[in-house]
Amino acid sequence: MSADPIDFVVTWVNSDDLEWRARRDSARRKHGLSVSGGGAGEERHREWGLFRYWFRSIEKHCPWVRRIYLVHAGRLPEWLDVSHPRLSVVSDQELLGDDVQTFNSHAVESQLLRLEGLSEKFVYFNDDFYIGRPLRPDFFFPGGLPYGVNVPTILADGDDRAHAMLNASGLINRHFSRREYWSHVVRRTLRPASGAMLARAPLFLASSVIPPVTDPHVGMPFLRTVVEEAFAAEPEAIAAASRAVFRSPLDVAPLYYASMWHFARGAYTARSKKTLGRYFSLSGDLAPIIAAIESEKYAQFCLNDAAIDDLDVREATLARAFQARFPEVSDYEYA
């Protein structure tokens, strides 16, 4: 087990904060964007009341974490004990500056290296990434390096997030040749442990450039020095990301870009995607989601928000499942 300190970084938005919502809606009108209905992207920031269970899952399953950095937008939850000695709470405006108003997680990602005292090894979480069973530090850093998917799958979606990943891969192609990239990735891909996933390799290998690949959408481990190197190589792109008020097809996803830089440098250890965790959409069948919460089947699981009709029913069902799974109040909460 690694003795190196590992920090966790999590971002959270309090969409129930009326002042934050007013600022966001004002900014959307200023940019000619809808403030209601399907075009408003409400699910991107929707607060499900489950954030306390993120802390409980971390305390229960990763008690070795050195420090948790919470980067937030809007009012903090009343139950959070901000005096916890291993918790650092930073607002998005503290990272970005009072003159920058953004409602884009990519902007926040671009400035995470400004977190004071952030360890060389750190793991980035969205607030909908949960730990499902006890994990050791070397789960995230096998062999001392961040994990990466052993058989990358070419990205095929077309939303703003996918565009940001495509643009990030364009930056990678400026600095690494296909041959350089392949020299690290192929030898981690073409091995028996990749199993059935090898069937996807020909499409990946046929690309004439370094292609964008899918994100497993679980905790993202990084080496701080590698992220620094990646960001320093594209200062204009990172600066532009920090000023992006809302997501758009012109965005760059900074941490996705940094993860691809780890791949291109060979600074990762290949792991099977299914061993890393499982992605769920909250608009889908609740039965497998509840099963994931109630069991230790998955190391990590993501509960991604989406357009939902029966929101109240799903919120109550998930809250009951999480409370049954993690009933003990964590040290990060007021008793």
Image (cartoon, rainbow, N blue to C red):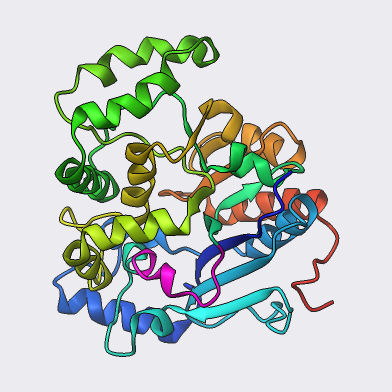
At x 21%, y 57%, the residue is 251
Residue lying farthest bottom? 98
The one nearer the camera, 99 or 16, is 99
Give the residue displayed 29% in from the left and 81% down from the top.
Answer: 101
Q: Quadrant of residue 45?
A: bottom left
Q: Residue at x 47, y 72 (%)?
A: 15
| Coordinates of residue 122 in the picture (x, y in percent) | 55, 57
The location of residue 243, given as percent across then percent down, is 23, 73
Could one spot residue 153 in this view of the protein?
A: no
Please check the rendered image and state whether residue 115 is part of the magenta-colored stretch, yes or no.
yes
Report whether 175 appears left or right of 84.
left
Compared with residue 315, is residue 12 higher up or lower down, i.e. above or below?
Answer: below
Identify whether 86 is placed above or below 316: below
Question: Quick check: is 300 in the magenta stretch?
Answer: no
Decide which of 255, 82 is in the foreground and name it: 255
Closest to the observer, 238 or 82: 238
Camera-side residue of 205 and 225: 225
Q: Quadrant of the N terminus?
A: top right
Residue 159, image x, y percentages: 25, 45
Q: Which percent across, then down, holds residue 31?
A: 15, 73
How many callouts does the rendering have?
A: 0
Q: What is the quadrant of the C terminus in the image? A: bottom right
Would residue 88 be seen by someone viewing this image from the given angle?
Answer: yes
Q: What range is drawn magenta here?
A: 108-119
